[in-house]
Image (cartoon, helix red, strand yellow):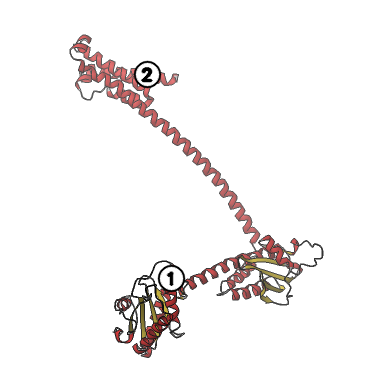
Amino acid sequence: MKSINKNLVLECVVFATLAMGLNAFVFRDAMIRWNPSPLWIIVLLVAMRHGSPAGIIGGCVASGLHLWELTRVGNTFEDLLHRTPEMLLVPVLYILVGMYLGEIRERLARRSEHFQGVVADLNKRLDANEIQRLNLERAHLEMEKRIAGQADTLLGVYHNLSRLDAAETEDELWEIVVETTRSGMRAEAGGVWRLSPRKLLAVAGALSERVPPLAALAVRKRGVATVGDWVAGENEGSPLADMAGVLVDDAEGQVVLVVTGMEFGQLNRNSAIYFELVVQRVRVIVGELRRLERLKRISIDDPRLGLASEIYLKNHIHKQALLARRHKTPLCLVCCAPKNSQPDGGMADRLDTVLACAIRSSIRASDGVAWFADRKAFVVMLPQCDLAGAAIVMRNVAGKLDALNLRDAGGVPLLDLRWNSEVLGGDVDSDVVYDRLFSGMEANAGDAVETVAVVETIA
């Protein structure tokens, strides 16, 4: 603090002497004639270097020099106070501006200190991360040293795990995993068991039909169990297996992989690691197969009505249209939708289900039907069928519904259907055909043959 005050006094003396000398011998009254005054240099330099108190002192020095110059050229203090007080505004501004600039400088200094602290903390974190990175590099080098010379083993593991990815169904996966595990671990036998309900899904080699107790231990551990984990209790003999691992554990039951009859030299840590890798990989593949199966089921089936989905039927119509063009056979589409507005809620769903059952029972196994939700209509695909065959299907559906006698309390039919049919002669590349099909529906279901709208589409 003393050194700062000393420097401040020296700077003020130097600046004041310099200003007075230049004003007296060079510029001749420049301190009051120039605007802005050169005295602002004292305020700016002192305030920005030393802060608010120093800015006030610098402002006072500049103000004193300004007043001294005013008195030197003939102005008295009485005149300044009583006649021209506006001339005192500049000396006051020196002090205010010095205080303001000094405060700004102190704030910037505090911010600088804060950011320096932040930078210091970040440097510490960087140092810690660098130390952690070096530790990880050392661990990586140690791991590389440990796996050096085992390239053939790792390549074999990779090929065995890659074989698992070739499975397209769970049954195929069980066969591959048993054969892969048994050959990779040099075991006499292996099998995949579903413990609940009890079922042998896949087996390779000689394996008893009795579920190995080690499989139940693996289920209790929710992972992999080895013969080293086995502790025989009362009336319990051999675990009948060397290793067991849980492949699936869900509502359908537990699926366990069991390997038995391994060579004594294979009962080591590397074999246990390999076995656990296989188990983990199979879990991932099973989840992926089931997810794909669900997506396939969703893309093909409409769970609400038990029909094909709209997307699946459109793709199927596209394929059948190509076949129809190639073999020069007809392909007919029939559209059916209730004419009157159906009741809301469960009654509408039940009526849709009744209509779906009537349509499904009136078509062939090679035909297709789907519910188009945005159009609120059923679309039936009839390969190798012309308009006459489509009319027969429409009459059969109407007849089945008439036999059910679906009427409300006032005797009004609950299902008054609109129909339309269209013969396709080629490819279906857009929704134009479906727009034409839906827009041409007629109102009378009983006279379906006469009211059908015929549109020939030539590819």
- Marks 1 and 2 sit apart, C-alpha to C-alpha, by 97 Å
Front residue (pair 144, 217)? 217
Q: Is residue 65 above or below residue 421?
A: above
Front residue (pair 294, 124)? 294
Residue 129, given in percent of the width and then of the height, sits at: 54, 46
Is 73 left or right of 18, judged from the image as shown? left
Q: Residues within 10 Å of mark 2 (few under 14, many from 20)?
A: few
Q: Is residue 148 above or below residue 415?
A: above
Q: Earlier in the sequence, mark 1 or mark 2?
A: 2
Tell me what residue is drawn at x 63 percent, y 57 percent: 143
Front residue (pair 400, 431)? 400
Amino acid residing under circle 1: Asp
Rendered-image quadrant of the C terminus: bottom left
Residue 360, given in percent of the width and then of the height, sits at: 44, 81
Q: Disc 2 marks which residue? A: 10
Q: Is label 2 in a helix, a strand or a loop?
A: helix
Q: Residues within 10 Å of mark 1 (few under 14, many from 20)?
A: some
Please tell me in which quadrant of the rendered image residue 240 appears. Answer: bottom right
> Any mark on residue 349, and which?
1
Is 156 left or right of 115, judged from the image as shown? right
| Residue most extreme to the right | 235
Q: Is residue 424 visible?
A: no
